[in-house]
Amino acid sequence: MKIKKITLRHMKLDLLSPFVTSFGVEYDKDFILVEAVTEKGITGWAESVAMLDPLYNEETVKTNWHILEDYLIPIILKSDIQHPDEVSEKLFKHIRGNYMAKAAIEGAVWDAYAKETGTSLAKALGGTKEKIEVGVSIGIQESIEATLSVIEARLKEGYKRFKLKIKPGWDVELINKVRHAYPNIPLMADANSAYTLADIDHLAQLDAYNLMMIEQPLAHNDIIDHAELQAQLSTPICLDESIHSFEDARKAIKLGSCKIINIKVGRVGGLTEAKKIHDLCQENEIPLWCGGMLEAGIGRAHNIAITSLPNFVLPGDTAGSALYWKEDIINPEVIAIDGMITVPESPGIGFEPDFHKIEKYTLFMKDYK
Ligand SMILES: O=C(O)CCC(=O)C1=CC=C[C@@H](O)[C@@H]1C(=O)O
Ligand SMILES: [Mg+2]
């Protein structure tokens, strides 16, 4: 398969409500949308999840554009790709890091490949599910009462899991009040690296609330201290930011740094690496779920596809588009019914780009041939 043209678009969508975490607030979402056209005229689509600012990791929209334009796109345009696995295993192997940039173009190649072979992306990846269970990620709210109102609304919509962002000063009292109000809901906390080992005793208080997991309590690049913390906590630790590759996952499992892993396709450099981590975790009985990066519809479509693999046994972040956007850039938009999303069976990502909406939210675009 040869890619004859790649178009990058700098997109900007306004979030319906600000998303507050321990490291900052997002009011809107800037991201790069990748469109790759094959010699047969088939178009593959993917999104980069790199943010405008280097707060989640070191990548940004600008660094991604540079790496895509100056390194990754020239490689893809001169390659004859027999299978998308080659992109990360061969073509990009010599380029260090820049996982979100790599994932964005590798995802577009996977979508085009699935379409050319007449397969859904889910099936092309080895997916087995017809529907996936999804939960919601609830940012830091104005008050605990406001958090309870959001939970009540999402519960009514049937979402299967409730992730609350925590940070020092917004943790034990919040979880205590939510657990008191909702004794049995599947509840988890995401700290986005807001704590250190000095907080072990404080974090151990969360063991009293039957949380599904505590996500990424310690440093974004740590697996050693998480192993020490996991030995002291009964609540499973889930790693997000710390896992960039199969090797990171292998070492974290070996050290006992976590009992659950959140896979984000962009964070690990693409769908091929995500599949490898999936298979490693399946062999080691480490349950997975698919994390979100506030994606628009194209990115959500990729998340739905990877979540169809069998070891994604916990509800992920891929909630319906309507929780994030006034309007999405795909048709149909992603709709969760009673916390379930149907995995598309049509070729590729299974959602059509809405060119009118894409044009409306494009700040800048450039073609590469
Ligand atoms: O897309 C979603 O709904 C999940 C959003 C979410 O929880 C996150 C998005 C981006 C970075 C982080 O703040 C956080 C995460 O760590 O998962
Ligand atoms: Mg997280």
Image (cartoon, rainbow, N blue to C red):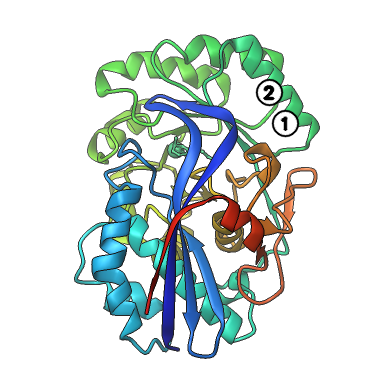
**Picture disc at residue 150:** 2
Pointers 1 and 2 in contact (C-beta within 8 Å) = yes
Q: In which quadrant will I find the N terminus?
A: bottom left
116 lies above or below 128: below
Residue type highlighted by circle 1? Arg
- For label 1, being within 8 Å of ligand 1 is answered no
Q: Is residue 39 visible?
A: yes
Please state if 361 lies on the left or on the right of 338 as rendered.
left
Seen at 69% across and 24% down, the residue is 151
> Does dot 1 land on a helix, a strand or a loop?
helix
Q: Which residue is mark 1?
A: 154
Seen at 30% across and 39% down, the residue is 54
**Between marks 1 and 2, how big is the CA–CA gap?**
6 Å
Q: Nearer the viewer, residue 225 or 69?
A: 69
Q: Nearer the viewer, residue 102 or 193?
A: 102
Q: Nearer the viewer, residue 278 or 120?
A: 120
Seen at 59% across and 86% down, the residue is 117
Residue type highlighted by circle 2? Val
186 lies above or below 275: above
Q: Position of residue 188 (x, y in %)?
A: 55, 30
Q: Residues within 10 Å of mark 2 (few under 14, many from 20)?
A: some
Q: Is residue 265 visible?
A: no
332 lies above or below 181: below
Q: Residues within 10 Å of mark 1 (few under 14, many from 20)?
A: many
Q: Indicate the quadrant where residue 351 lies.
A: bottom right
Q: Position of residue 141 (x, y in %)?
A: 56, 18
Seen at 64% across and 14% down, the residue is 146
Please state if 110 lies on the left or on the right of 115 as rendered.
left
Q: Indicate the quadrant where residue 346 lies.
A: bottom right
Q: Position of residue 178 (x, y in %)?
A: 63, 16
